[in-house]
Amino acid sequence: MKFLANENFPAASVMALRSLDYDVSSVAEDVPSISDEKVMEIAIAENRTIITFDRDYGELIFKHGYRPAEGVIYLRLEPLYPAYPAEVIHKLVQSTDFQFSGALTVVDVNRVRQKRYK
């Protein structure tokens, strides 16, 4: 799976996902301080799933028409430690319950929910 880690995604989690053989590009490493719209454009061009703690991505999808084919995973939880988000993402991807393409996936402490846009 190919990810695009938004700037707010911890570097330790980026490294942890890479160590698990995920293809992870990092906004913080490659193009810091770009707009959310530019992050969407990169994800669309490179067929990557965005992983973020930024709630603005739902608005970009549903109000402004951005449609990253591989989806967006929005984490609504406090990282317990820097690699914790990677553990959450890895567990989520390993589950057979979710399809991320064409969906905004919202992960909080109690549940995972998805809203399709394709």
Image (tube, rainbow, N blue to C red):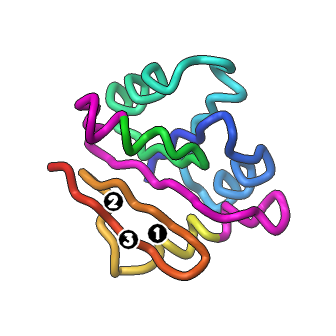
Three-letter amino acid code at disc 2?
A: Phe
Crowding near the residue tagged with mark 3, few <14, some 14–19, many ≥20 C-alpha atoms within 10 Å: few
| Range of residues picked out in magenta | 60-87
Q: Secondary structure at mark 3?
A: strand
Crowding near the residue tagged with mark 1, few <14, some 14–19, many ≥20 C-alpha atoms within 10 Å: some
Residue depicted at 24% across the width and 51% down the height = 102
Q: How far apart in space, not on screen, are marks 2 and 3 (Cα)?
A: 11 Å
Q: List the residue tagged with mark 2.
A: 100
Please state if 87 lies on the left or on the right of 107 as rendered.
right
Numbered label attached to residue 93: 1
Please state if 48 lies on the left or on the right of 31 as rendered.
left
Q: Are marks 2 and 1 in contact (CB under 8 Å)?
A: yes
Q: Are marks 2 and 3 in contact (CB under 8 Å)?
A: no
* Residue 99 drawn in magenta: no
Q: Secondary structure at mark 2?
A: loop
* Residue 69 drawn in magenta: yes
Q: Are marks 1 and 3 in contact (CB under 8 Å)?
A: no
Crowding near the residue tagged with mark 2, few <14, some 14–19, many ≥20 C-alpha atoms within 10 Å: some
Three-letter amino acid code at disc 1?
A: Val
Residue 81, image x, y percentages: 84, 64
Q: Secondary structure at mark 1?
A: helix
Q: How far apart in space, not on screen, are marks 2 and 1 (Cα)?
A: 9 Å
